[in-house]
Image (tube, grey):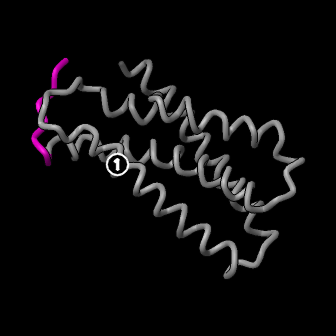
Amino acid sequence: MGMIILPLFLFWFVMAIYAGRLGYRIIKTQSFTRFGLPLIVLTILCIALYVFLGLQLFNQGEPIWAFAILFFFLAGEPVWCVFLPAYFIQLLAGKRIQDNRIKALLFLIITTFSWGALVATFVSEGFIEHHQIPITY
C-alpha cells in the first residue's frame, strides 16, 4: 500500500506548497488586516472542520479497512468533486480572474483539501486508537 499512499502524500505535499504560494500572492495585494488575516483564520477553521467532519464519518463503531481513512482524505470523492475543479480553474484561468473574492475562494478550497489531507494522514491513526475502531485488512 505504501506504493500508492506515498505518491498521493507527495502530491498533497506539493499542493500544500502551491497553496501557500497562491495565498501569499493573494494576500500581498490586499490589506493584511482587512483581507489577509480573516482569510488565514477562515482557512485554518475550514481545514480543522474538514478533518474533523471527515474523521467523524468513520466513528460509527463498525470495523473499517485499515487504509479507509487515508484513502478518503488522499483520494476520496471530495477530492474529485471539489478540489480538482477548483485547482484546474485556478491553474487554467487564474491569471484572468480579477475578483479577489473568487481568488480567495479558490485558495480556500485548494488549501483546505491539501493541508487537510496532510493533517488527516498524521492524525488518523490516533483517531482510530482513541475511538477503538476495529481494523480489517
What is the x, y in percent for residue 100?
78, 62
On the image, which quarter does residue 108 sit in? bottom right
Magenta-highlighted stretch: main secondary structure? loop
Query: Who is closer to the viewer here, 129 or 72?
Result: 72
Query: Who is closer to the viewer here, 99 or 12?
Result: 99
What is the x, y in percent for residue 58?
24, 37
Kindly identify which residue carries mark 1: 53
What is the x, y in percent for residue 48?
41, 57
Residue drawn at x 87%, y 48% is 95
Q: Residues within 10 Å of mark 1 (few under 14, many from 20)?
A: few
Q: Amino acid at mark 1?
A: Leu
Query: In the figure, 45 relative to 133: above or below?
Result: below
Query: In the figure, 25 relative to 135: above or below?
Result: below
Residue drawn at x 67%, y 46% is 18
Residue drawn at x 44%, y 20% is 4
Query: In the figure, 33 relative to 25: above or below?
Result: below
Residue drawn at x 14%, y 48% is 130
What is the x, y in percent for residue 35?
69, 74
- Most extreme residue toward the right is 96
Which quadrant does the C terminus fall into? top left
Is 20 left or right of 48, judged from the image as shown?
Answer: right
Which quadrant does the N terminus fall into? top left
Query: Who is closer to the viewer here, 5 or 136?
Result: 136
Callout 1 secondary element: helix
Does the magenta segment cover residue 65? no
On the image, which quarter does residue 67 sit in? top left
Q: Tell me where the magenta segment starts and ends, as one range.
A: 130-137
